[in-house]
Amino acid sequence: MPVATAAGRPPGVRELAAHATRDAILRAATKVFAKQGFAGGRIEQISKAAKSYDRMIYYYFGSKEGLFIAVLEDTYRRFNDAESALALDTTRPLDALDTVIRFIWTYYQKNPEFITLLNTENLHRGKHIGKSLRAREYSSPALGITGRVLESGAAQGLFRTDVSARDLYLMIAAMGYFYLSNRHTLSAFLGENLDSPEAMAHWEAFVIDAVRRTVAKG
């Protein structure tokens, strides 16, 4: 992402170096917190992984908690950026809806830190992300995309008019998130490998069918 200064001029060498250092710390912290959790992730681990210094973490993020909040915000931002880049043809709402479902399902698989970081934060009852000044803004793009697909389907007489974008998004996210975050324990419980390619493909198809049935006009 291009970096610009507050004055709109191209950044200088020092500014580029500062952004590079901050980004390196953020990437390293994402990996460490995803693996060790908030409590287990240590500042010295992160600074070493970022090839930086402890003092730079405090300089850019203020504290370990400030860094963790920044990691959560960046995690949501990257998800939203990827979702916003989807090429959706809302004149074909069923296909567009399938695309949104497959995107979320695939994104969770390709970015396992997304799930582990959110699991960690939920163990803390959301006390860190609750201090974020930007958390709420990240839900708007996701709900907006889902809402546009729903509106198009309703306008064409294909979808119900009483399904909210919020509820549908929660349904899609929950069915993918729960399966992936619990597939190892569920495999033992059910006595089958839910991590196999066949099982994963089956669940994707099941989610698509369930969501389509939910929005279909009776």
Image (spheres, helix red, strand yellow):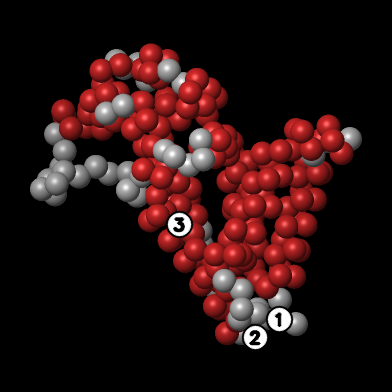
Query: Are there few (<14), some (14-19), or many (20+) residues within 10 Å of tag 2?
Result: few
Q: How much space separates mark 1 and mark 2, taking CA atoms?
A: 7 Å
Q: Is residue 101 left or right of residue 16?
A: right
In the figure, residue 196 lies in which quadrant?
Answer: top right
- Asked whether the residues under the numbered discs 1 and 2 touch, taking CB atoms below 8 Å apart as contact, a structural biologist would say yes
Residue 44 drawn above or below residue 160: above
Location of residue 209 in the rendering, given as x and y in whole percent from the top left corner: 76, 63
Q: How much space separates mark 2 and mark 3, taking CA atoms?
A: 27 Å
Q: Is residue 102 left or right of residue 24?
A: right
Secondary structure of the residue carrying numbered label 3: helix
Query: Are there few (<14), some (14-19), or many (20+) residues within 10 Å of tag 1?
Result: some
Residue 154 drawn above or below residue 214: below
Q: Which residue is mark 2?
A: 157
Secondary structure of the residue carrying numbered label 2: loop
Location of residue 21 in the rendering, given as x and y in whole percent from the top left corner: 28, 26
Looking at the image, tell me whether mark 1 or mark 2 is earlier in sequence order: 2
Of labels 2 and 3, the one closer to you = 3
Amino acid beneath label 3: Ser
Which residue is painted at 76% across and 45% down in the image?
A: 200
Of labels 1 and 2, the one closer to you = 1
Location of residue 186 in the rendering, given as x and y in whole percent from the top left corner: 79, 37
Amino acid beneath label 1: Lys
Residue 210 drawn above or below residue 75: below
Q: Which residue is mark 1?
A: 217
Seen from the viewer's position, the closer of residues 12 and 61 is 61
Secondary structure of the residue carrying numbered label 1: loop
Quarter of the image containing the C terminus? bottom right
Residue 139's tag is 3
Which residue is painted at 74% across and 38% down in the image?
A: 183
Residue 5's tag is none
Which residue is painted at 75% across and 33% down in the image?
A: 184
